[in-house]
Image (spheres, helix red, strand yellow):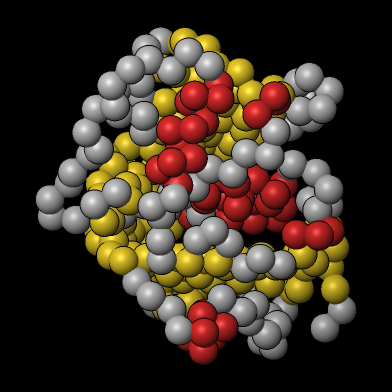
Amino acid sequence: MVKKLLLSVFVAIFFLGGCGPERREPKPIPGVRKTAAEALAVLRSRSEHTGPMKANGQCVWEYYFEGKKRKENCAVKMWVNPPAEVYLQGDVGFNPRGIVLGSNASEFWLLIKPELSRYSWGKWSEQETSGGLMVVPKTLDEALGIVKVVDERNWSLSKEGGFDVLTRRNDKGGISKKMYINPRNYLVRKIEYFDVNENALALAELDKYTDVTEDFFVPTVIRIVMYGEAGVESSESITLNLKSVKPDSFTEKRRKIIFTRPKTKGYEHIYRIINGHLVEEPQ
């Protein structure tokens, strides 16, 4: 239960976007993408315009803990320095840092207080599976429009329900991810993630895009659904609405302060995540 709880929080809150008083979406993109390479080229071109940003808003988190259904409605603040650096804190139970999560190029972490008092962290170099918290950075990057493709041969393009659908397959030929794209303006509307056995891991629905700068667009409404074993939808869900999003900049000193993993002091339980599994560490 703890592992699923941590996974739900971390994955869901990392699907980030923002909104302002005047929402503007990209203009229609003429032409038809006939191959995966052409579709990926459009997304890759968009990613070149992403930049540092800050935002705040509200997060509604519904989950089960110790057999009881819980609902948290917390204010959140976020700082992002693409492509790897993220810091977010949520106000839970009058604690402005009730939830703290972040990542940089080498590590990621999730801190929860006061009820759980748990500190979870891991190194990217120690994760060899696409399951668990490994889905987090990919999800964040794609929600913000950052597309990094190592091998285009693993991708295919199809048409489903009015969407252009990019499908990525793993080394065994199984589906690992599907991205549903509005063919008119080429904004990603839905992302599905799958484990090595093609069981659904998570679903993200992205809506109401707005511009951070003239060429930088992010979703403002994100609905997250977590799946249980064998792709069965669980009762855990997240809805994230950020009320403002603005460009930001980071000096080297400020960047190190914000995006460096916090110390573990003050937490009752400390977990290290190795290959997607939680291993409790001694105090």
Is residue 102 shown above or below 146? Answer: below
Task: Identify which residue, 15 or 216, lies in the foreground.
Answer: 216
Please determine whether, in this image, residue 174 is positioned above or below residue 205. above
Residue 242, percent from left and from top = 31, 56
* Camera sees residue 159: yes
Residue 187: x and y in percent read 36, 33
Picture quarter containing residue 228? top right
Residue 265, given in percent of the width and then of the height, sits at: 69, 88
Residue found 82% across the figure and 83% down from its top? 283
Q: Visible in this render: residue 230? A: no
Picture residue at 41% right of the left edge, 66% below the top:
52
148, 196: nearer the viewer: 148
Residue at image location 25% in from the left, 38% down from the top: 26
Q: Is residue 247 left or right of residue 109?
A: left
Horizontal placement of 76 versus 283: left or right? left
Between 58 and 246, the one lying in front of the other is: 246
Place of residue 135 in the rendered image (x, y in percent of width and height, measured from the top left): 65, 45
Locate residue 80 relative to residue 56 in the image: left or right.
right
On screen, residue 71 above or below 247: above
Residue found at x 78% / y 19%: 173
Q: Quadrant of residue 6?
A: bottom right
Q: Taking 237 as reference, is 246 left or right?
A: left
